[in-house]
């Protein structure tokens, strides 16, 4: 039970947390509890979707990133930027400008992640055609969704498309290219500018891969602020970008990370679903039906997909609009048969070797719903859960420090909570004289911390 | 452990609720994933059958350490010829039901394929009783 499966990029700062339980109430996998007035994360349940990060009113949840100075440990410092990064900026800010600032910051190369789509797209279509017995096939693009499926929908792990996302393909390509240009592997550092926490977690503890080809991860908001400040202060890049970064992204790559970005290119009947609660609702239903006539499912944890990542700065709807505009421009150029846009990108030279290593290993289910490994033991616990549920109010108030009555009942059975933590039960016990007010105060303080109960006294003193 | 769920005839928007609840419990019991899948598919088919054909129904679910027995009892028109209904493609569903993606005549055969044991009894103009039994250990089926 105590095996830790995941590295989490989301960190809870105890010293800042005020124990308001907003995060606990929005967590779609019920991974948060309140104890001693602080939010506690249950690692194996968290899928790094970032809902808690948004809900926290005091900034107690942070997204751990690599120290930016890390990049200088490498001679070749590659910034891998997703299309969403360009979508953060108003029209007048150009890719060249953004790249120039990145070079000024210390990177030596800039490359757009979605060049990897040039390799992946065809492979994905073929994969779907070749695996009709496993349909609907699901994209492994969003790492929060892959983890959600492992934890909450273990019966669906077989439906995942076991192909690496564009990020890994782009990283592998750039690494190989630099090696072929005569660089030592140890001199190459590949850094991804991420719009979300899940991608960080996926780099630090990849699912379906031995090791990620990415050296480090830098948060997008950090880069956005640096670049936008430079642009606002009139910075015009002195260094010109190195050629590969100026290689234009194909239209399919521009919107790949937006909602319907993958689905429109996949064969047969497809569905694109964004926002994690929408995905959960859909997968719940999907598990019941066997003969669903859908070939491909694109599932994303964030509303408006990566444009809605928790580390983005721009309004997600603006971002999507800008991405669509860039898509339209690229499409037009491709149709005009403009050489720069319509010719295969340099990544295609490495197609064979990239395809050779494009497969992911089987994604293992690891259900977190089980009450016990042993069925007989789990059965006993389930009985207990139901006995406890019969005494609870079904209000899901969260005063007990668990998000719902049913999660509270499970916590009790697993020895992580006590029945007296329920405020309704407490009142009953007080009324019948089984516990005195002091005891019940102690119980509440254990959940919500002493401070919350002292606040009133302090205010009275001031009066 | 015993649970009961009500099914409302003709209301497809609620169809699947009981299957989802049973699925949740199987996951809690750490039952083999393949068995969960088959149980849920069989139960869902059975549930939809009641919604499609009967006026109302009740699902009785009994878990023990070795198996789960899911009994669906409905009040409805009943099945005049069970053998015929078991054939793939045989369907009495109305065109409205078919338009909703149900009633392709795969229901009973699919249930039989997925269930470890399937018993159907029916009385015309009274109702149908379907009993699905699933064993948690694969070997148990052969014993």
Image (tube, coloured by chain):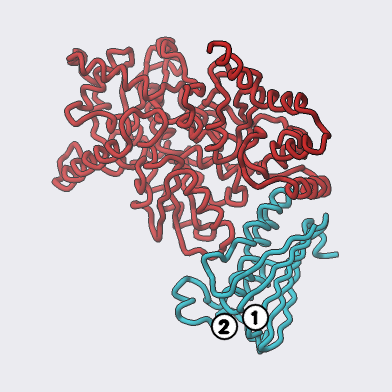
Chain colours: A red, B cyan
Which residue sits at x=46%, y=21%? A215
Q: Nearer the viewer, residue B47 or B111?
A: B47
Q: Chain of mark 2?
A: B
Q: Nearer the viewer, residue A160 or B124?
A: B124
Total count of labels: 2
Q: Nearer the viewer, residue A164 or A281?
A: A281
Residue A351 pos. (x, y %): 37, 39
Element under disc 1: loop
Q: Tell me the quarter of the image containing the N terminus of chain A.
A: top right
Element under disc 2: loop
Which residue sits furthest right? B143
Q: For the residues marked 2 and 1, what is the alpha-carbon distance in whole angstroms?
A: 8 Å
Residue B83 falls left or right of residue A381? left
Residue A349 pos. (x, y %): 33, 35
Whether residue A402 appears in this view of the structure is yes
Same subunit, labels 2 and 1: the answer reads yes
Which residue sits at x=34%, y=51%? A265
Q: Chain of mark 1?
A: B
> Where on the picture, by quarter, is residue A341?
top left
Whether residue A375 appears in this view of the structure is no
The reply to whether dot 2 and dot 1 touch (C-beta < 8 Å) is yes
Residue A370 falls left or right of residue A379? left
Disc number for residue B86: 1
> Where on the picture, by quarter, is residue A462?
top right
Which residue sits at x=60%, y=26%? A39
Residue A78 pos. (x, y %): 36, 21
Within-10-Å neighbours for mark 1: few <14, some 14–19, many 20+: some
* Residue carrying label 2: B90
């Amino acid at each position: 039970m105590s095996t830790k499966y995941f590295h989490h990029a989301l960190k809870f700062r105890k010293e800042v947390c005020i124990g308001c339980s907003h995060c606990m109430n929005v967590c779609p996998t019920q991974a948060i509890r309140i104890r001693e007035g602080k939010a506690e994360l249950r690692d194996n349940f968290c899928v790094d979707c970032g809902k808690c990060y948004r809900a926290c009113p005091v900034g107690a949840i942070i997204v751990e990133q690599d120290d930016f100075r890390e990049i200088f440990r490498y001679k070749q410092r590659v910034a891998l930027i997703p299309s969403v990064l360009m979508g953060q900026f108003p029209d007048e800010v150009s890719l060249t400008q953004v790249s120039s600032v990145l070079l000024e910051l210390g990177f030596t190369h800039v490359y757009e992640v979605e060049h990897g789509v040039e390799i992946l797209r065809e492979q994905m279509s073929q994969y779907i055609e070749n695996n009709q017995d496993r349909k609907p096939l699901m994209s492994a693009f969003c790492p929060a969704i892959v983890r959600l499926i492992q934890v909450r929908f273990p019966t669906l792990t077989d439906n995942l498309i076991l192909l690496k996302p564009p990020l890994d393909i782009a990283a592998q390509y750039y690494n190989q290219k630099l090696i072929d240009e005569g660089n030592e592997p140890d001199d190459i550092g590949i850094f991804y500018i991420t719009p979300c926490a899940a991608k960080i977690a996926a780099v630090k503890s990849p699912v379906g891969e031995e090791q990620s080809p990415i050296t480090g991860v830098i948060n997008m908001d950090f880069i956005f602020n640096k670049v936008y400040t430079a642009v606002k202060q009139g910075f015009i890049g002195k260094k010109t970008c190195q050629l590969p970064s100026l290689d234009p992204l194909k239209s399919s790559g521009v919107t790949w990370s937006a909602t319907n970005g993958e689905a429109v290119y996949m064969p047969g009947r497809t569905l694109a679903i964004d926002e994690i609660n929408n995905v959960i609702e859909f997968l719940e239903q999907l598990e019941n039906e066997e003969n669903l006539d859908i070939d491909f499912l694109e599932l994303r944890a964030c509303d408006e997909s990566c444009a809605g990542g928790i580390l983005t700065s721009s309004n997600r709807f603006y971002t999507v609009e800008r991405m669509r505009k860039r898509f339209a421009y690229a499409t037009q150029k491709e149709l005009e048969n403009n050489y720069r846009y319509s010719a295969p990108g340099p990544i295609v030279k490495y197609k064979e070797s990239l395809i050779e290593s494009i497969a992911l290993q089987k994604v293992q289910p690891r259900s977190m719903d089980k009450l016990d490994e042993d069925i007989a033991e789990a059965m006993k616990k389930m009985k207990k859960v139901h006995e406890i549920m019969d005494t609870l109010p079904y209000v899901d108030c969260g005063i007990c420090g668990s998000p719902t009555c049913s999660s509270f009942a499970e916590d009790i059975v697993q020895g992580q909570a006590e029945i007296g933590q329920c405020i309704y039960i407490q009142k009953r016990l007080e009324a019948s004289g089984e516990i005195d007010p002091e005891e019940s105060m102690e119980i509440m303080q254990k959940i919500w911390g002493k401070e919350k109960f002292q606040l009133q006294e302090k205010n009275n003193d001031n009066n | 452990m015993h649970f009961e769920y009500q099914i409302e005839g003709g209301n497809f928007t609620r169809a699947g609720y009981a299957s989802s609840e049973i699925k949740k419990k199987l996951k809690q019991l750490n039952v083999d994933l393949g068995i969960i899948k088959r149980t849920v598919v069989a139960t869902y088919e059975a549930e939809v059958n009641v919604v499609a054909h009967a006026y109302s129904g009740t699902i009785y679910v009994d878990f023990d350490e070795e198996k789960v027995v899911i009994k669906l009892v409905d009040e409805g028109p009943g099945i005049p010829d069970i053998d015929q209904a078991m054939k793939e493609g045989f369907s009495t569903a109305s065109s409205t039901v078919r338009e909703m993606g149900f009633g392709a005549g795969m229901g009973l055969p699919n249930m039989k394929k997925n269930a470890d044991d399937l018993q159907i009894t029916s009385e015309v103009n009274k109702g149908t009783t379907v009993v699905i039994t699933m064993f948690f250990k694969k070997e148990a089926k052969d014993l």
